[in-house]
Amino acid sequence: MTIELKKLTKRFGSLTAVEAIDLDVGDGEVLCLLGPSGCGKTTTLRMVAGLEYASEGDVFLQGKRVNDLAPRDRNVAMSFQFYALYPSLSVAENLAFPLHGEGLSKSEINARVQRISDTLQLGGILNRTPGQLAEGEKQRVAVGRSIIRDPNCFLFDEPLSRLDVQLREEMRGEIKEVLQDLSKPTVIVTHDQLEALTMADRIAVMRDGRIEQVDTPHNVFQRPSNLFVAGFIGTPQMNLIPATFTALHGDDTAEFAVEGGQTLTVVVDPAIKTLAPGAKVTLGIRPRNLEISTEPVADGLSTRIDIVEPMGAETLAHMNDGHHDLRLVTDWRVPLTEGEQAHTRFPPGTTHIFTEDEQVLRTP
Ligand code: ATP
């Protein structure tokens, strides 16, 4: 079973909410649609479910074009937050609820409840009511209820958004495991990058109705394909510094005039060779890649430490080179004092280069 979207587009009057999206989700794959509010995630999901018709383009489920099929004929399961259980029904009755009206025999319903209860380890609590369950158990029942119908694929819209932080963490891992076992394509909409990074096999990062990058969680973080993805994924945010490429030394040691007057000479991707001196770029470096140096270095910028935020094992420092805020995360033992001068260092290979059209400059 697969989900395939081809040039899928949705317009609401003059607003293009989703623009020519191409995407495919394979058997047993969990794909997260991730992006800021209003970028078109929910609308995309609703077009797959048939709750919204496509203005242009196609939705294929298992190779079959389903644009003209009503939601009930697509056999997809779309659920929202995993939380609304019927308080007066037992766990078994809650699980069986979505099966009523499907014309199944009682023994078939019981068998399905049994299977879900085995998968989610609900065996010991089938006769309890939600009021007698711990929060985590309630969530497992709610997940069970949303997958019991055995649809062709699963669609979830912000499934964890109502949970408290601790439960979210527990559920993220649990849901991934359950979904992988079910071997169906799954699409999860979220605006929470940690949720996407932990639950997804692949992430589609969306902005303004378009897909900016579809890749593994590792790659969207380590190898962002453009400035938007680089800035959107990762906490604290990647440092993004406007600069001009001035000279190349050897194959991959590039010199940049950083806005504000400092010069930075760093080892970058050899694709820098394709850039002409004078080109405007944005340099990107993650706060955890930036290092502190005891003295000024060619491959670093001199800064003043504005704010020091202890975060337990690590410290986040907000620094300023006179023109840009730079975020640095380092081991808590590194001494950092607000108001003092500090020198940063950009280790070889940790600086991403984005060209004027906001695309990354990288050897394929
Ligand atoms: P959020 O995380 O806030 O739900 P989203 O990424 O899911 O955001 P959508 O809900 O898909 O975004 O909305 C995409 C755009 O389409 C938004 O600008 C929204 O206002 C608009 N939109 C969504 N549904 C409709 C509708 N029925 N009529 C008109 N505009 C709509």
Image: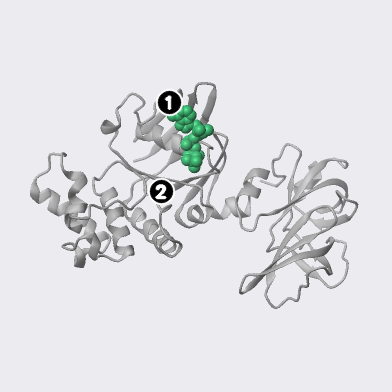
Q: Residue furthest bottom?
A: 333
How many other residues sit within 10 Å of disc 2, few (<14), some (14-19) or many (≥20)? many
Query: Which residue is labeled 1 in the image?
Result: 54
In the figure, 312 relative to 346: above or below?
below
Residue 226 is at least partly visible in this image: no
> Is tag 2's residue or tag 1's residue first in the polypeptide sequence?
2
Residue 94 in picture, x, y percent from top left: 20, 53
- Residue at 87% in and 65% down: 297
Report the amino acid beneath label 1: Ala
Q: How is the image coloured?
A: one colour
Labels 2 & 1 near each other (Cβ < 8 A): no
Q: Quadrant of the N terminus?
A: top left
In the figure, 43 relative to 160: above or below?
above
Gap in angstroms between the C-alphas marked 2 and 1? 24 Å
Query: Which residue is labeled 2 in the image?
Result: 29
Give the side of residue 13 with respect to residue 149, left or right: right
Of 10 and 134, the residue lying toward us: 134
In the figure, 41 relative to 164: above or below?
above
Give the side of residue 353 with respect to residue 76, left or right: right
Q: Quadrant of residue 180?
A: bottom left
- Residue at 53% in and 52% down: 193
Report the amino acid beneath label 2: Glu
- Residue at 58% in and 50% down: 220
- Please name which of the two marks, 2 or 1, marks the residue nearer to the observer: 1
Residue 198 is at least partly visible in this image: yes
